[in-house]
Image (cartoon, helix red, strand yellow):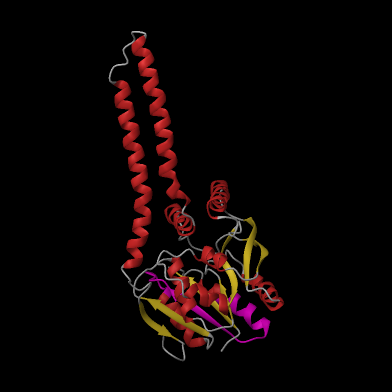
């Protein structure tokens, strides 16, 4: 069994894969210990599949998992965890925004006795101020809702001990928020600071829509506090409607006719509140629905480079 397994999820990464493989391989060879590179092709539509197959043929350390359909980044990493066999498992994206050269420092922390060593961004190159601001706000909200177990300015770039990976593997939820799952698992954890780079080539595969979905998954997966929102809104509505009712009584005593506008306004407020409440409850019901279906997280079309087929 190798000492290190490096999980590299890939989706339409034909422009960066060769450079990614070169840099990661150089880092791992210089570490002087056995390793494997587990590439997970997340249903790519470009030439990623052929490039990965070529890398596997030329490098005995390469393992490839091809999905039959796109499952998403978190599912691809989850598949990598299932197929990885190393004592320490490293998760890194193929776009080289997280520099592979940080891996030896993570490995040193692991050898010191830390079970999870996560990359903490000291700066972000090539990202807009809006993205930096929204990320900061999101982590503040997440910490308020779910507690301080989630370190800020972190992503999926990390090294985890095999026993921690086993805990996460056995978590049954389908809506995966892996950075939160690793944080929730506990064990000894520490950060390694690094400077996040611009994407080496190509376009980001995490647009605003996907980022918002990932953020929602993180909050819903690790906090039940949003369920308190309907109660708070309902209480506020009762207070406002009570004040409005008293105001209408006073207006009537003073001979001022409020007309039907007040009623219309209150009906609209009530409708909005009901819709908000239903929306929040619906998100949790949808999560339950996804889990009770019992479908597999991913569908594998082909694997290459593994001694034993999974």
Whether the magenta-drawn stretch holds residue 34 is answered as yes
Q: How many marks?
A: 0
Whether the magenta-drawn stretch holds residue 156 is answered as no
Q: Nearer the viewer, residue 154 or 35?
A: 154
Q: Residue furthest bottom?
A: 307
**How far across and how far down the image is residue 153, in percent?**
60, 57
Residue 9 in view in this figure:
yes
Q: Nearer the viewer, residue 45 or 231?
A: 231
Residue 96 in view in this figure:
no
- The magenta-colored residue range is 21-48
Instruction: Please determine whether, in this image, residue 217 is positioned above or below residue 167.
Output: above
Instruction: Please determine whether, in this image, residue 184 is positioned above or below residue 213.
Output: below
Quadrant (top left, top right, bottom left, bottom right) of the N terminus: bottom right
Instruction: Please determine whether, in this image, residue 305 is positioned above or below residue 259.
Output: below
Residue 235, located in which quarter of the rendered image? Answer: top left
Residue 263, located in which quarter of the rendered image? Answer: top left
Q: Residue furthest top?
A: 255
**How far across and how far down the image is residue 46, in percent?**
39, 70
Q: Nearer the viewer, residue 203 or 163?
A: 163
Q: Residue at x 36, y 22 (%)?
A: 245
- Apparent side of residue 144 relative to residue 40 in the rendered image (left or right): right
Quadrant (top left, top right, bottom left, bottom right) of the C terminus: bottom left
Q: Residue at x 55, y 70 (%)?
A: 92
Q: Residue furthest left?
A: 260
**How far across and how far down the image is residue 183, in percent?**
57, 65
**How far across and how far down the image is residue 122, in percent?**
66, 57
């Amino acid at each position: 069994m190798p000492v290190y397994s490096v999980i590299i999820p890939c989706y339409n990464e034909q422009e960066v894969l060769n450079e990614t493989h070169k840099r990661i391989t150089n880092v791992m060879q210089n570490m002087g210990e056995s390793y494997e590179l587990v590439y997970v092709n997340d249903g790519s539509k470009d030439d990623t599949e052929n490039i990965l197959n070529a890398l596997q043929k030329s490098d005995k350390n390469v393992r490839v998992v091809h999905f039959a359909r796109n499952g998403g980044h978190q599912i691809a990493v989850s598949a990598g965890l299932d197929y990885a066999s190393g004592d320490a498992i490293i998760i890194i994206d193929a776009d080289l925004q997280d520099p592979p050269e940080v891996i030896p420092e993570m490995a040193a922390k692991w050898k010191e006795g830390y079970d999870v060593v996560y990359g903490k961004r000291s700066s972000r190159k090539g990202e807009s101020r809006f993205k930096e601001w929204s990320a900061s706000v999101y982590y503040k909200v997440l910490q308020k809702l779910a507690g301080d177990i989630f370190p800020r300015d972190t992503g999926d770039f990390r090294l985890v001990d095999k026993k921690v990976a086993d805990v996460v593997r056995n978590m049954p939820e389908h809506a995966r928020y892996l950075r939160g799952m690793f944080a929730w698992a506990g064990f000894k954890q520490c950060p390694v600071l690094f400077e996040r780079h611009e994407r080496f080539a190509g376009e980001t595969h995490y647009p605003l829509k996907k980022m918002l979905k990932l953020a929602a998954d993180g909050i819903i997966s690790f906090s039940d506090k949003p369920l308190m929102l309907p109660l708070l809104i309902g209480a506020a509505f009762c207070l406002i409607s009570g004040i409005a009712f008293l105001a209408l009584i006073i207006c009537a005593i003073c001979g001022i006719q409020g007309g039907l506008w007040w009623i219309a306004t209150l009906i609209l407020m009530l409708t909005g509140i009901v819709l908000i409440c239903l929306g929040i409850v619906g998100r949790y019901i949808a999560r339950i629905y996804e889990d009770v279906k019992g479908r597999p997280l991913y569908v594998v079309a082909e694997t290459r480079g593994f001694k034993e087929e999974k």
